[in-house]
Image (cartoon, rainbow, N blue to C red):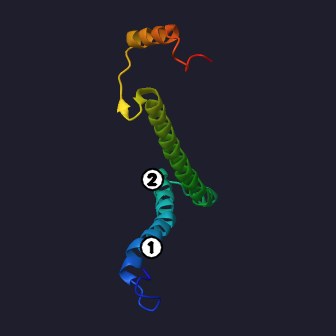
Amino acid sequence: ITVHGIRRLNVKLATTVFIIPIGGSALLAVIFPAFTAWGIIRLSGITNAITIARINRFIYPVFLAMVFGYRIQRQTAQLIENWMQTVRDEEYLIGRRLHNIEPNEQAGNDSNARNNPNNASLAA
């Protein structure tokens, strides 16, 4: 944005990178829960002023909790996916080469490694 100096800002880049996404998200965060509350009130036929006020008051914290829950779920899924990939890499990658370890081959290799006196890795 400030490549050409502070007096010649790249307004188009600033608008597309910062103003539109932040402004759009803020506008959506205000309007979407309000329209949802309006729809709940109209579809359910609520006419009690106290109930309408409660719906309008609680709709924003409910949406905030839903957004936080969604974010926590996404980050937890990403964490589990990274953990599973790490386990796969540790278990099946030897050096930089991928090996398929069969159960009967693994048992045979373990018995050969134990019987080999030159193998210092299993000496402990």
Residue matched to label 1:
18
| Residue type highlighted by circle 1 | Phe
Residue matched to label 2:
43
Q: Quadrant of the C terminus?
A: top right
The answer to whether mark 1 and mark 2 are in CB contact below 8 A is no
> Going from the N terminus, do you reach mark 1 or mark 2 first?
1
Image coordinates of residue 50 in percent, x first then y, are 64, 58
SS assignment at label 2:
helix
SS assignment at label 1:
helix
Label 1 to label 2: alpha-carbon separation: 37 Å
Position of 118 compared to 48: left or right?
left
Q: Residue at x 48, y 45 (%)?
A: 74
Instruction: Say which of marks 1 and 2 sits in front.
Output: 1
Image coordinates of residue 99 in percent, x first then y, are 36, 25
- The residue lying furthest to the front in this view is 118
User: Which of these two is toward me, 73 or 89?
Assistant: 89
Image coordinates of residue 8 in percent, x first then y, are 41, 90
Q: Quadrant of the N terminus?
A: bottom left
Position of 28 compared to 16: left or right?
right
User: Which of these two is toward me, 48 or 88?
Assistant: 88
Density class for disc 2 (Cα within 10 Å; few <14, some 14-19, many ≥20) is few
Above or below residue 41? Residue 90 is above
| Residue type highlighted by circle 2 | Leu
Above or below residue 116? Residue 45 is below
State which quadrant residue 122 falls in.
Answer: top right
